[in-house]
Image: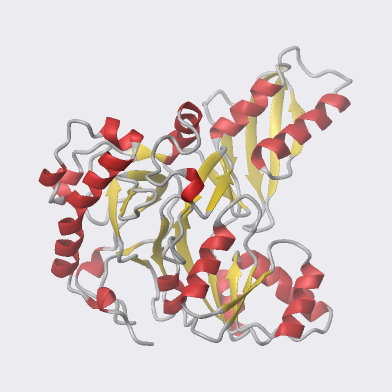
Amino acid sequence: MTLDKLETRTHTDRESALLHDLPEQIQYAKEHTEYFAQLLSQIDPGKITTREALASLPVTRKSDLSEQQKITPPFGGMNATPIHHLKRVFQSPGPIHEPQGIELDGFRMARSLRAAGFCSGDLVHNTFSYHFTPGAWMMEGGAHALGCCVFPAGVGQTELQAQTIAHLRPTAYTGTPSFLKIILEKADELNLDSSSIKKAVVSGEALTPSLRDWFTKRGIVIVSAYATADVGLIAYETPKLSSGMIIDEEIILEIIEPNGSKPMPIGETGEVVITVFDKDYPLIRFGTGDLSAIDPASLTNPSPCGRTNLRIKGWLGRADQTTKIKGMFVHPGQVQEIIRKHPQISKARMVVTGNIGSEEMKLLCELKDGISTDVGDLNQAVVQTTRDVTKLRAIVSFEKTDALPSDGKLIEDARTYA
């Protein structure tokens, strides 16, 4: 597949182009957003022409968005385009709201899909949720930009998904890897033909080695894309890469000390911080809360596919306790919100167990007056509150006083990554 001119630049040319455009983008953010006008009021954008200068600017973190958006709704004053001129507004758990501008592929997902072999004429079976969150629209915009047709499958209804694949014969899939496996297994069970799917771009959860092997044995080329609702595509795999993810051409990525501001040395793990050149939502030094590291080998060895940009080592965890479950982020603040809504609870801890894609979420609670024999109504109420707050189902369990560790942890990820 032909690469575009941005993907084959030298490191020097790429860095020069990004840093050349950076001062203008910072100036734009200051002039068109309330938040960055205040945050960068003492900053001369014309002087931010190096990575060292960029590193002197403050970091705006995803973990702060929910509170910032309460203060200045709906986007914390970070949007340059007024809400009534946007195409869509999304809501992710937190709650956090994200804008979508009028560009066809404003999240820049086409680059990842094209690298996976998606092309004009493909029918894409898109199983990301079209409800509230932007994942489905991110993939759909990228697919449309390539000339693909999209079937908006959404989530759930596994048997119907398998029947639809057998009937429509889509060539490509977007969604989580675990759900693709579930659909294909259901198709096998029903003796339905799902062999038309030959390529897949997955996101929202880890593509484990065992899952990748399972798809490969079925003749499916599957790669991961790393994106967030706030900044769009960050990095992506290609079929010829044995490890790592290529950084998107249209962002500036930094790896900084977790919860800090200072850049980390090449190869060391830190927080992923992104500056975008988006005109609707011009985020400057946006801290994703995700951990990764630059692959030192990518400084001198381009990807076998011919793309020359630096590579990151993929998703290596979270700088805070935020955990992604079935494609949805669960934040420590959400556990605190559940506690606030039920004054009987003195302490709570969300424990996530199982395998990726088939997790079990359990909320362990301690009551202020100890365990009562009559907690049935409270249990049901907490189950409903947990679902309202996180948009996910959870089992609620009441523990003995002082049974939960006093380590400040509100979310424990005890899943199996195999």
Q: Residue furthest top?
A: 369
Q: Residue at x 40, y 75 (%)?
A: 242
Q: Quadrant of the C terminus?
A: bottom right
Quadrant location of the N terminus in the rendered image = bottom left
Residue located 34% across and 53% down the image = 279
Of all residues shown, which one is farthest toward the left? 47
Tell me where residue 304 appears, x and y as whole percent.
32, 81
Q: Position of residue 53 (x, y in %)?
A: 14, 44
* Relative depth, front residue between 263 and 18: 18
Count all numbered tags in the image, as a single digit: 0
Name the spot of residue 61 as percent of width and height, x first: 39, 39
Q: Is residue 259 visible?
A: no
Relative placement, left or right, of 310 versus 70 is left
Q: How is the image coloured?
A: secondary structure
Look at the picture and state if 383 lies above or below 179. Answer: above
Q: Residue at x 31, y 77 (%)?
A: 303
For residue 160, which quarter of the picture? Answer: bottom right
Q: Considering only vertical position in the picture, is 174 above or below 57?
A: below
Image spot of residue 331 (x, y percent): 55, 38
State whether residue 239 appears in this view: yes
Which quarter of the picture shows residue 212? bottom right
Q: Nearer the viewer, residue 143 or 163?
A: 143
